[in-house]
Amino acid sequence: MLLSQLFTVIILGLIQGLSEWLPISSTAHLKIAEYFLGFSATPLFNVFLHIGTLGVVIFYFRRDIKIILTDLVHGDFHSEYGRFIPLIIVASIPTGIIGILYDFYLGDNYQTFLIMGITFLIGATLLFLSRYGKEDQSKISYRRALIMGAAQGAASFPGLSRSGSTISSGLLQNVKREMVFKFSFLLSIPAVIGDLAVEAYHERGSFTQGVGVSSINLAIALVFTVIAGYFAITLVKRLVLTKKFHYFAAYTFSLGIALILMALLLGY
């Protein structure tokens, strides 16, 4: 039983770490994994794993964050990093609005295999089209930031990836790849914090159930989440900069088709 639980939490930790930052949708992959593993993660367990992936992105971009915070303290919003502050604020508005509307009006009702399959196909299309960005814009305007923020909000739907949506929408607006990569991940930080806050609020009465696993297994799951998350961000950066980010479209398209077929055959 203990070995079975250990295997399960390692798998979930790896999936959370990889799929949170790869353009393949962590929510959908965790739902699929829990279905086939026969494991139902408690809200507190999910919060712990999300804290792990949040910590990874903060650590990875720690130098950028330090410069941004320094510019914020000095009120410098015109430097290279200072410009990120108002852009992130502007982009976070549509992210928050779409995320809240999804949470209150759709939520768990739109986490079936059929819905996830359809959204995977939409995400695959965005990923494939991102290869055609012209990269003739070195800066992100407020309009482009709004669009990227809206794309991040749309990733509330399982099957649409946060990084896939924001990076693809940035590339499709012809912004240079390095800028899109950096802004996309920095933009994800307040969004993930917001997601954690909303989940903690909704599930506050369920936290007394515990994490559903032993403390040792939880620690092991966190370690695998952190390692996988760091690897995922590094891989995304390499693929974005080498113009291979759209390669993930083949995987998400295939998974989308498979989920739709499973929904039709299994009725899930």
Image (cartoon, rainbow, N blue to C red):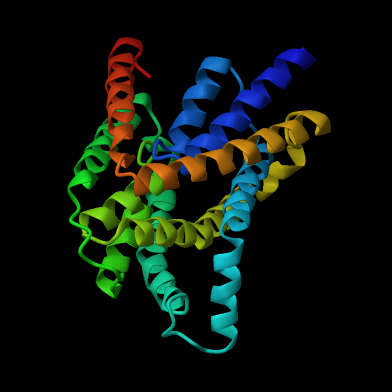
In the foreground, 255 or 38: 255
* Outermost residue, front side: 242
In the foreground, 222 or 77: 77
In the foreground, 48 or 115: 48
Q: Position of residue 238 (x, y in %)?
A: 42, 44
Q: Position of residue 41 (x, y in %)?
A: 63, 30
Q: Position of residue 107 (x, y in %)?
A: 43, 43
Q: What is the count of numbered marks?
A: 0
Could you say which quadrant of the image residue 193 lies in? bottom right
* Quadrant in which the C terminus appears: top left
In the foreground, 165 or 39: 165
Residue 139 lies, with reference to residue 225, above or below; the image says below
State left or right for residue 197 relative to residue 172.
Answer: right
Could you say which quadrant of the image residue 48 lies in? top right
Q: Residue at x 28, y 73 (%)?
A: 141
Residue 102 lies, with reference to residue 213, above or below; the image says below
Q: Position of residue 166 (x, y in %)?
A: 35, 53
* Quadrant in which the N terminus appears: top right
Residue 24 lies, with reference to residue 62, above or below; the image says above
Viewer can see residue 32: yes
Q: Residue at x 55, y 39 (%)?
A: 231
Could you say which quadrant of the image residue 138 lies in? bottom left
Q: Residue at x 23, y 46 (%)?
A: 130
Residue 17 lies, with reference to residue 204, above or below; the image says above
